[in-house]
Amino acid sequence: MLPIQPLNHPLDGSVTLPGSKSITNRALILAAMSAGETRLEGALFSRDTRIMLTALETLCFQTQVTEETASIAIKGLGSSVPAQTARIDVGNAGTAARFLTAFLALNAGGEYHLDGDAAMRDRPMSGLTDALSALRAAEFNFHEKPGHFPFTLKSHSFRGGQVTVDARASSQILSALLLAAPAVSASFLPKAQALQITCPDVRPQYVAITLKMREAFGAQPVQADDSETYTLHPTAYTPPASGIYSVEPDISAASYFLALTLIHGGTLRLPNLNSEPLQGDAHFVEVLAHHGLHVDAGRNAWIASCDPSNDRRRDHREIDFRFISDTFLTYAAIAPLLGESVRITGIGHTRRQETDRIAGMAAELSKLGQLVKEEDDALTIQPKPNELRARALKARKDGRILAIETYEDHRFAMSFAILASYDLLGDGKPWLAIKDPDCCAKTFPGFFDALEQLRP
């Protein structure tokens, strides 16, 4: 359990964000499917990306890793998978789980055993496994529950065709197919067949990242037609012309430091971000702008600023987080400081992520004395700042400190650390602690160090 030392001054500093997990893992798969060597610069080294990297090495891809410079070189084999058999543990990494499953289907005659941890065994895979089965690209032997890990995958490769995909549970299901299904070696291009994927009701922001990244590795632009169908022509992926792919910093991680700037005022620089990022979570800036945060997005950095005298409190509002759902916890955790009630909508799918994020957030805010109404797809929070203060004082009087459960979910740890940074009792002493702070290793291993470095 980690007590958080509050900040008691406006910000004046810089935070170098880690690379995006989503982009790093997509780039690793694309590099593996390309004919030649690609070097990823600015890559994230975290639990989820290490799982992907280890899986590729288990499959006998040649890699060269230099963590000090956030660099990974990988020699792609043009849609071939060197190992015909392997056992792969995907932990609780959703991108690794979905992307690897579709990727392994490329290798006709391969047989692979895949499993994950207890949480991953509960996460939905059937939208992807059903699609791969329908395309006859793979067949599955599920060892426990149908459509879930663990399973054995026998791969037959993609041969074109049509399929309707259910990716309502996770857009990663569609992204996995968009990445792997059209991949062929250059020698097979003339006789390979196109594939049509129809996928209604999918959240678009991460799919857009996938489509843009395909282009960076030589694929032709593609978009869904009016019937939400993607036509994928056979693609021989190639490394970028320079041989280098630069991984964009993680804007979901930026959300915590944007919220920190709103709470404390001052100025914070986030280097290596540009004015037109790939990641849809950039729109979280608009949510905080309503409370007085200003972000100047330049070519090489974002500068976040807020007047320390700014009154961030606002009247009741309803916000649709459907397209920026990874940031809803950031906002919900600081809601006790933001004025009147807020209804956060469009988040039903987050019940099936690392944990049930709606239920978890409702439980932790209720523990802090906030009034919370939980719905299938929404969360309404009625801030009670006086009750929060009273509970923190009582805990201190009893020789305790309020503590947040993190449910093995990195976003709970980081979101509530921002609330804990607020000097609630006015004495600069910790009043809120984070249980299992190491769960941040999933996407941001150095998060608490970065927070600490903002002290004068």
Image: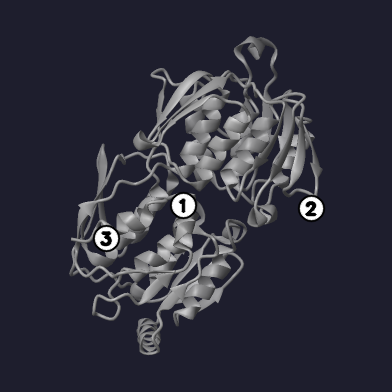
* Quadrant in which residue 44 is drawn: top left
* Quadrant in which residue 103 is drawn: top right
Indicate the colouring scheme: one colour
Label 2, on which residue?
145
397 left or right of 180 in image: left
Marks 1 and 3, how far apart at CA: 23 Å
The residue at 55%/66% (across/down) is: 358
Label 3, on which residue?
261
Query: Picture coordinates of residue 303 (x, y %)?
Result: 23, 49
In front of the other: 162 or 263: 263
Which mark is on residue 236? none
Closer to us: mark 3 or mark 2? 2
* Quadrant in which residue 288 is drawn: bottom left
Is disc 3 surrounded by few (<14), some (14 to 19) or many (20+) residues within 10 Å?
A: many
The residue at 64%/21% (across/down) is: 80
Is disc 2 surrounded by few (<14), some (14 to 19) or many (20+) residues within 10 Å?
A: few
Mark 3: secondary structure: helix
Is disc 1 surrounded by few (<14), some (14 to 19) or many (20+) residues within 10 Å?
A: some
Query: Picture coordinates of residue 262 (x, y %)?
Result: 28, 63
**Would you place residue 297 above or below residue 5 in this image?**
above
Which amino acid is tagged 2? Lys
Which label's residue is closer to the chain start, 3 or 2? 2
286 left or right of 353 in image: left
Label 1, on which residue?
441
Which amino acid is tagged 3? Thr
**Would you place residue 137 above or below residue 323 in this image?**
above
